[in-house]
Image (spheres, rainbow, N blue to C red):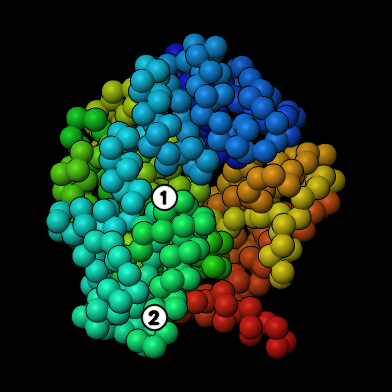
Amino acid sequence: MFKKILIANRGEIALRVICACKELGVKTVAIYSEADRNSLHVRFADEAICIGPPQLAQSYLNIPAVISAAEIANVEAIHPGYGLLAENANFAEVCHMSEIKFIGPRPEVMRLMGEKEKARTAMKAAGVPILPGSEGIIASDGEAVEWARQVGYPVIVKASAGGGGRGMRIARNEEELPGLFKAAQAEAAGAFGNGDLYMEKYVEHPRHIEFQVLADEHGSVVSLGERECSIQRRHQKLLEESPSTQVTPELRAQIGEVLCTSLKKIGYWNAGTIEFLMDQDRRLHFIEMNTRIQVEHPVTEMVTDVDLVKSQIMIAAGAKMDEVLHGPIVHRGHSIECRINAEHPEKFTPSAGKITAFHPPGGTGVRVDTAAYAEGVIPPYYDSLIAKLIVRAKDRNEAISRMSRALEMFMVEGVYTTIPLHRKILADPDFRAGNFDTGFIERFLKKNEKK
């Protein structure tokens, strides 16, 4: 096991990694910007190093500064958390060249999965179900029209290097496709420095289902089941749960087996998440892979009793899967996670500022992952996530009741939060009945505007 790890992140995920390290007996080094000097991850780490001013490019995304901090602290490994440098293959490569273990997959596999069209091709070759679409990058709007005629409308063009919904456009006929293709290309080039696009058949009213996997460095891969992530706005998830009401035990086992086989073929290791769209016939189609721990990993932890962050660290230290898991994966009960953001609950505008009062809920089956506290400040420079509220119960109905109670008892004052929005979602009859897809929030907001 490592003696000391640097955490190349901030906020609740940095604190989450510190918790895992403390249980493993591993010393931790926090890095922080000047804006995060009074953050809890700085307080609870064994050591802390300031790496620059508040701006991300000069602090948390400054690879030389992060590596310098790691070398000064004499760490053996770096945990990247999620976001920031977590899926930056160049950073993983620099870690390797600096003889520091990167807690994640190999750089070449990160690059393969990071370019969506290459990932799509690799998964197709490995037998993972994918949507009909283009073969490779589309060079022009004329070529896009040719592919669309083969695929059939509606189609969606996507940025190969994309994420967060940028560089994506849906075309429903041939007349609008060329203009939408050029707009997506320009947006992708501006957002990612790469305007490459590919095309897929567009699925109407899909559900967003993702599978969590763990892979050791000795060739073993296991699937920990799925998470339902359809409650999202503009491709940003708001609420997740596990298991999905739409995934049968047979489908779970089938997809899990295919994923384990495919990830062995590409030489994947550490934690990863494979994202799918589910069509109205309950067929799953691969869309992308995230080569890191996910924001919503706690719902999987709650129903499997597997600590995914500790598993990541143990795998990176050379442990075999049977040492990590100590037996087969068993799913128990139902879990829901609500992302509590510092945002106006109706306008979705950021709400930075000082938290004047903070009281997280507790009780049976309630977990709160947060780095927030009373008198703490939500800075304007970073992601607006304040906390993740997670519940576990014997079934979905009890989980909804427990989450509703916990939201009611969650007190955050001084900034706007999305707690009122989550309470309304949990009370919605369609959500309670499981009748939703990725368009749920847009319909929900319109319905509530009329009231």
Q: Nearer the viewer, mark 2 or mark 1?
A: 2
How far is the residue under mark 2 from the one under mark 1? Answer: 39 Å
Residue nearest the viewer, comparing 107 with 339 = 107
Question: Where's residue 227, x and y in %?
Answer: 40, 58
Q: Residue at x 60, y 37 (%)?
A: 57
The reply to whether residue 237 is visible in this rendering is: no
Question: Where's residue 124, x and y in %?
Answer: 18, 59
Secondary structure of the residue carrying numbered label 1:
helix
Q: Residue at x 77, y 50 (%)?
A: 352
The reply to whether residue 400 is visible in this rendering is: yes
Q: Is residue 90 above or below residue 145?
A: above
Amino acid under disc 1: Thr
Q: Quadrant of residue 198?
A: bottom left
Residue nearest the viewer, comparing 60 with 190 = 190
Q: Is residue 176 above or below residue 96?
A: below
Secondary structure of the residue carrying numbered label 2:
helix
Q: Earlier in the sequence, mark 2 or mark 1?
A: 2
- Dot 1 surroundings within 10 Å: few (below 14), some, or many (20 or more)? many
The number of numbered badges drawn on the structure is: 2
Q: Which residue is mark 2?
A: 177
Question: Where's residue 171, x and y in %?
Answer: 40, 81
Amino acid under disc 2: Leu
Residue nearest the viewer, comparing 193 with 283 = 193
On-image quarter of the N terminus: top left
Q: Which residue is mark 1?
A: 300
Question: Where's residue 134, x and y in %?
Answer: 24, 69
Q: Residue at x 51, y 55 (%)?
A: 191
Q: Residue at x 73, y 47 (%)?
A: 380
Q: Is residue 256 above or below residue 398?
A: above
Q: Is residue 149 above or below residue 120?
A: below
